[in-house]
Amino acid sequence: MIIIGERINGMFQDIAKAIRERDGSIVQEWAKKQEQNGARYLDINVGPGSAAPIEAMVWLVEETQKASDLPLCLDSTNYDAIEAGLKVCKRPAMINSVPAEAEKMDRVFTLAAEYDSEVICLAMSAEGIPKDSESRVALAMELVATGDGYGVPIENLYIDPLVLPCNVAQDHGPEVLETLRQVKLISDPPPKTVVGLSNASQGTRDRELVNRVFAVMAMACGLDAAIADACDDELMSAVATARILLNIDIYCDSYVDVFKQA
Amino acid sequence: MALEIQRERYRSKVGQVVLGATKEEGGTRSHTVTVGGESTLPFLHFEGEMPHRPVIALEITDMVPEWNPCFGEYYDDVFEDTAAWAKKCVDEYGADLVQIRLQSADPDLQDRSPEECAATVKKVLETVGVPLIVIGCGKAEKDNLIYPVVAEAAAGENLLLGVAEVENYKAITSSCMANLHNVIALSPIDINICKQLNILIAEMSMVMNGRIIIDPCMSALGYGIEYTYSIMERARLGALQGDRMLSMPMIGNIGHEVWRTKEANTPVEDAPGWGERAERAVLWEATTAMAFLQAGLDILVMRHPRAAALVRKNIDELMQDNSY
């Protein structure tokens, strides 16, 4: 499973401050730290309170690229900000995200085709997030079919079944896991899958434990990527171990270190 | 409708290792030998690249070996002169490389000193132009004294020095780091230990990147060849799928293993159904080698000149382009 490092996000106060004061050092530090701990993409989110999200996105992308060569995952509901970010990305990026809504899909898939981007596709529509896995899979199919129509390769699509906090929407958990399994059957090649891991633990007391356990359960269902805290050593160790138990990596005593460095 | 050929695509490839160094590169070799670089399984030229052909090293020892008497016909005149023996391997039998086993250093045999071993290696270096593989006597305590002396005496020559094992890798790795040689990482037919040992060596210094050759531990035909084969297959698939800690070229001491089998040594009188011994032994070594070529072996260390000639012909044929 690929870890998309979640830390460069204006929701965190240090990043919000860095954006306000245009202090690149904090952004670069997080970019390096996450990469060293095994992140393979870096999520870039200007946060909800940003006054000028387009400029902030461009600035964050540029600062991050000074410290890391990892591909970026541009995270915004403002597609103008995403497009501005794509223009300054040095290598193909990931767009985070698009729901199954015609107008938004048109905008995002057009961008993805133009910039050779990967896309995180949310299994939700204008009506919200469905509960059962069948409806989530149906939305995934709609997203895949639409993306294909715009010439975006299916391997570049990451279906996000949408994880909800386990303390408020406990019954969604099994549906999400089932969606991860079913999504792999909708096409050949199948789309990839991704989750926003920290959502599972929102508002719970022992957040990290919930995240770790959910990560390995989802991996067993075929999860390809997660937006997660790459600096949670226990999480990274659990992911590395799950890769061994799923026979993805070849075991050796130092497998955790190897996973982080790979 | 045209037939679509299914091709496997791999994410990564095997690393390349250069053995030997010419005068311009700080050594005295007439040429260097590069191994590795495969981006597909062995000889599937239609799927990927195999930029360097597998090479054959002939093995010699620094004292008269207790080999089957049939080797007298080839080496009787040079058994006592290691340098002349090496020269004969190259000039008459076409060896790409020569592997010297410093057998005489064994405390239970001649207990020769590290300095004497280094002198032997120097003499061989002066006599032949091919890159050299040098391995110890097999007694770890003594070998750890030999490595630094031999490595220093041959500084600049970019030797392949062996062998490092999980229980004993630091002395040899330090010697290679200090004098820029390559190391053989030997694991006992165990993919997990193989990977771990590569990590341990790589962790000692960045210098060792691109200087490790895997020895997965050979076994002869009829003596567990399939175990080694499947370990090699797994390592190679790992390398092609991006496991950097398994992406090294591989070496195997084929002659050493085959010539311990009863099939190579039993006279025809004792086993009439097996056919004439000389022919049988040569074929046993050649067949074992050919199987390992298919598992991805890059450096074949062989003993019998006729077996080596058969395998060289086999490599010539396998390296013919079969892409379409």
Image (cartoon, coloured by chain):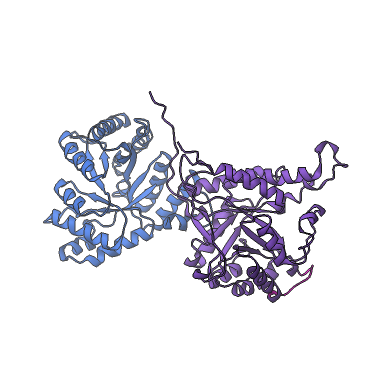
Chain in purple? B
**Left or right of residue B165, residue B268 in this image:** right
Q: Residue at x 46, y 44 (%)?
A: B48
Quarter of the image with the C terminus of chain B is top left
Q: In the rendered image, which quarter is residue B114 located in?
A: bottom right
Tell me which chain appears blue. Answer: A
**x, y percent for residue A118:** 28, 44
Farthest residue to the right: give it: B269
Instruction: Name the residue furthest top.
Output: B1
Q: Which residues are magenta?
A: B107-114
The residue positioned farthest toward the front in the image shown: B91
Task: Please determine whether, in this image, residue A240 is positioned above or below residue A113.
Answer: below
Residue A76 visible somewhere in the drawing: yes
**Residue B146 drawn at (x, y percent):** 66, 72
Residue A65, x across and y down, in percent: 26, 59
| In the rendered image, the vertical position of residue B172 relative to residue B230, given as above or below | below
| Residue located at (32% from left, 32% from top) | A133
* Along the line of sight, the residue nearer the viewer: B224 or A126: B224
Residue B102 is at least partly visible in this image: no
Name the image quarter holding the N terminus of chain B: top left
x and y percentages locating residue A192 in the rendered image: 34, 40
Image-quadrant location for residue B141: bottom right
> For the image shown, how many numbered marks are present on the structure?
0
Question: Is-magenta flag for residue B112?
Answer: yes
Q: Is residue A120 magenta?
A: no
Of A77 and B84, which appears nearest the observer?
B84
